[in-house]
Amino acid sequence: MSTPHEPQPGPAYGQEAAYVAHGGAAPVDATPKHAPAPGPQPVTPPDQDVQPGPPDGGYPVLPPPAYAPRNDLAVWSLVLGLLGVMGCVFFTGIPAVVVGNNARRAVAAGQANNDGMATAGIVLGWVATGLGVLVILVLAFMVLLPLLFLGLALPFLAVAP
């Protein structure tokens, strides 16, 4: 028997210590030290709400979700709306509105859980589309208005010989 201060041989590489005996050491007992005592367990009346959890007081084991929420639509709507406001106007503003509406439908169907992000993408998409319309109107007036005035003024500027 070795003294408590001498190092004990460890498990083989890739093996768990509780199941492997090496170097002539006695096999380690695989039963956990905190196993519940045998005997009758306390029964909770059915009218009380009991949270499930492990008997040793550790973290409760939660079941995996039944579905993975489809949050990518709202993220894309927000990204497209931001790009539209930053200068891509129609090219990303209109798709932001379309994808945002699809994301809101997914939220209503219970397939996603980020309604606020979808709404922000829709709003930014409409703002980008409005900015695009405003830019086109300003450019149209800047180009067409001088041409209109030039067209009206040319007959009067002609010098008679």
Image (cartoon, rainbow, N blue to C red):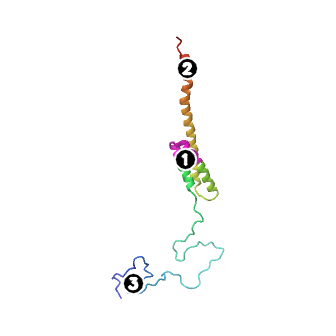
Label 2 Cα crowd, 10 Å radius (few <14 / some 14-19 / many 20+): few
CA distance for labels 2 and 1: 44 Å
Is 151 covered by the magenta stretch? no
> In the rendered image, which residue does mark 1 sit on?
81
Q: Residue furthest front?
A: 161
Q: Say whether disc 2 or disc 1 marks the residue closer to the N-terminus.
A: 1
Residue 8 located left or right of residue 128: left
Give the residue type at disc 3: His
Q: Is residue 138 above or below residue 153?
A: below
Relative image position of residue 70 (x, y in whole percent): 58, 58
Q: Magenta span covers which residues?
A: 83-97
Q: Which mark is residue 22?
A: 3
Quadrant of residue 49 within the rendered picture: bottom right
Q: Are marks 1 and 3 in contact (CB under 8 Å)?
A: no
In depth, the one of 62 and 10 nearer the eye is 10
Q: Secondary structure at mark 2?
A: helix
How many tags in the picture?
A: 3
